[in-house]
Amino acid sequence: MEDDLKKVGPKTTGCLSLLFCLAGVLTLGAFTVMYMFNNLIAPTFDLIRINLVQAFGIDLFISYLTFKESNSKEGDEVKRLTNVAMVTVMFLVLAWAAVQFM
């Protein structure tokens, strides 16, 4: 019985860590949308500010519209999450730089 648990352990740990990374990337994306909207769009067009939940919905909608199906192999989930996180951080840094000039 212990041998069965040893076989399942690393795969379950990898799945849980992947889920936590996915939640972190989704939260980072929602924060980036919220930051960009509240600091760039809202003051420019005199709109109300949005919260994190609303930004999460906007992020999901934008992701749905811009989704591209990839032909990558199974097991590339970590690489895809890293790529998404890097692009999100890049947009956050660019938005921060743009806010500095407003």
Image (cartoon, rainbow, N blue to C red):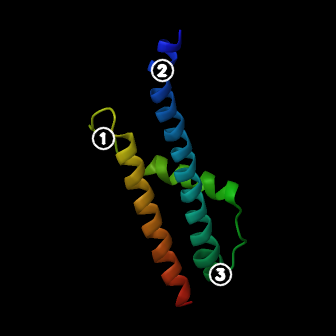
Pointer 2 local density, CA inside 10 Å: few below 14, some 14–19, many at least 20: few
Q: Is residue 67 visible?
A: no
Residue wearing tag 2 = 6
Across and down, in percent, residue 16 comes to: 54, 35
Across and down, in percent, residue 52 comes to: 68, 59
Residue type beneath disc 3: Pro
Residue wearing tag 1 = 70
Q: Residue 36 falls in which quadrant of the image?
A: bottom right
Note whether 96 is above or below 10 in the view shown: below
Q: Looking at the image, is mark 1 or mark 2 earlier in the sequence? A: 2
Pointer 1 local density, CA inside 10 Å: few below 14, some 14–19, many at least 20: few
Note whether 41 is above or below 51 in the view shown: below
Note whether 80 is above or below 34 in the view shown: above
Q: Secondary structure at mark 3?
A: helix
Q: Looking at the image, is mark 1 or mark 3 earlier in the sequence? A: 3
Nearer to us of marks 1 and 2 is 2
Would residue 18 be found to the left or right of residue 74 on screen? right
In percent of the image, x 50 and y 54: which residue is there? 62
Image quarter where the C terminus lies is: bottom right
The mark found on residue 43 in the picture is 3
Nearer to us of marks 2 and 3 is 2
Using the numbered discs, state the Cα–Cα distance from disc 2 to disc 3 in whole angstroms: 55 Å
Viewer-nearest residue: 43 or 93 = 93
Q: Residue 86 falls in which quadrant of the image?
A: bottom left
